[in-house]
């Protein structure tokens, strides 16, 4: 059995505990049965300004929280049972601050409750991390639902325009990979979005080993928000697949030209016009090429998702696609 500590040892233990509480950012105060503060350790503002107050709340707490804190202390004095609560304080410089307050009874050698020991631990950083995590989880949930809605639309349209299960699987797999590629860019930017040029190159290089010559990008480089990045990535995927099959990218020396230009909308608002142009293999009946999901995505799905408008023109030997979208989908200058 260990020997009881001497008076000197007890004093050293007390000093060590005070140092430990200070290093851990823990404040302690002792109040007698009248809730008068007898001593305190490591109290920081705004709690430090409360020492002259009998109840120790100093008026810095909202009335309701101050009443709860006093009631909790009185309950401990009356019952001897520990109690605690969380309080929040508005700070002009630091915003809202949170504290966990623990209240324990101090008993005399005879077992009578003669005061309370109040421990104050600031939990502001933990609270802010929790709030940030909750916000991120809500954002992930929201974006996941959006992504699932896009996938559902792709599956529906692909099935409608596919003649067999093999064709469906081939097209659907390619479109999912397109979404995954765009999603990687969005995720790497902490969900801010993706640069237009980077997005185009990323989609085209899935079908061409020489994107430096296969795609020529001119004009502006708008930064697309996540929704715009996913849908424009899908549009570029459809155009690239068509180009590999019938157009410029099916030839060794072929290339496509992509341009982003600032324009003014009907009400003078700033918009971006995206233009894809390429030379294709001559075709007698261009309408047959538009009876695939590609044209549905390009002319309906993508512009509807961006609150814009689009036009796909397939001539005898040339393909052009023009998409116009409002500024809500992009920004031209990044912070």
Image (cartoon, rainbow, N blue to C red):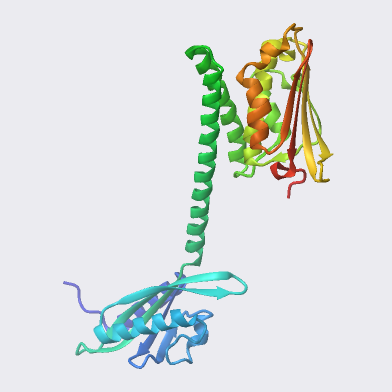
Q: Residue at x 50, y 50 (%)?
A: 138
The spot of residue 46 in percent (x, y) is: 53, 80
The spot of residue 148 in percent (x, y) is: 51, 35
The spot of residue 146 in percent (x, y) is: 54, 39
The spot of residue 221 in percent (x, y) is: 77, 36
Figure quadrant of residue 68: bottom left
Q: How many marks?
A: 0
Quadrant where the image shows the N terminus: bottom left
Determine if residue 7 is in view: no
Question: Is 292 above or below relative to 1?
Answer: above
Q: Nearer the viewer, residue 71 or 53?
A: 71
Q: Nearer the viewer, residue 252 or 289?
A: 289
Q: Residue at x 67, y 13 (%)?
A: 289
Question: Is 98 above or below relative to 271?
Answer: below
> In the displayed structure, does residue 176 sit left or right of residue 10?
right
> In the displayed structure, does residue 171 sit left or right of residue 312?
left
> In the displayed structure, does residue 223 sit left or right of residue 91?
right
């Amino acid at each position: 059995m260990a020997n009881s500590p001497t008076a000197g040892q007890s004093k050293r233990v007390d000093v060590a505990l005070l140092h430990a509480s200070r290093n851990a950012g823990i404040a302690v105060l002792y109040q007698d049965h009248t809730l008068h503060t007898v001593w305190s350790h490591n109290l920081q503002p705004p709690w430090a300004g409360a020492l002259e107050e009998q109840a120790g709340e100093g008026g810095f707490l909202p009335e309701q929280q101050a009443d709860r804190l006093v009631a909790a202390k009185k309950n401990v004095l009356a019952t001897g049972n520990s109690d605690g609560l969380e309080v929040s304080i508005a700070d002009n410089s630091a915003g809202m601050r949170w504290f966990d307050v623990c209240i324990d009874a101090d008993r005399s050698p005879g077992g009578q409750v003669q005061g309370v020991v109040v421990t104050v631990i600031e939990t502001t950083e933990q609270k802010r991390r929790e709030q940030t995590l909750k916000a991120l989880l809500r954002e992930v949930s929201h974006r996941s639902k959006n992504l699932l809605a896009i996938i559902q639309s792709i599956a529906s349209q692909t099935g409608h325009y596919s003649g067999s299960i093999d064709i469906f699987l081939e097209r659907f797999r390619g479109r999912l990979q397109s979404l995954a590629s765009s999603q990687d860019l969005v995720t790497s930017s902490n969900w801010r979005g993706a640069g237009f040029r980077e997005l185009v190159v990323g989609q085209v290089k899935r079908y061409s080993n020489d994107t430096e010559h296969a795609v020529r990008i001119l004009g502006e480089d708008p930064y697309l928000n996540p929704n715009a990045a996913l849908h424009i990535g899908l549009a570029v995927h459809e155009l690239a697949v068509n180009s590999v099959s019938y157009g410029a990218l099916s030839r060794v020396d072929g290339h496509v030209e992509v341009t982003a230009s600032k324009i003014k909308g009907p009400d003078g608002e700033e918009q971006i016009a995206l233009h894809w142009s390429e030379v294709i293999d001559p075709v007698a009946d261009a309408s047959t090429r538009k009876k695939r999901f590609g044209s549905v995505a390009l002319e309906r799905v993508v512009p509807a998702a961006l609150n814009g408008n689009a036009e796909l023109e397939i001539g005898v030997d040339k393909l052009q696609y023009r998409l116009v979208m409002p500024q809500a989908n992009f920004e031209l200058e990044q912070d």
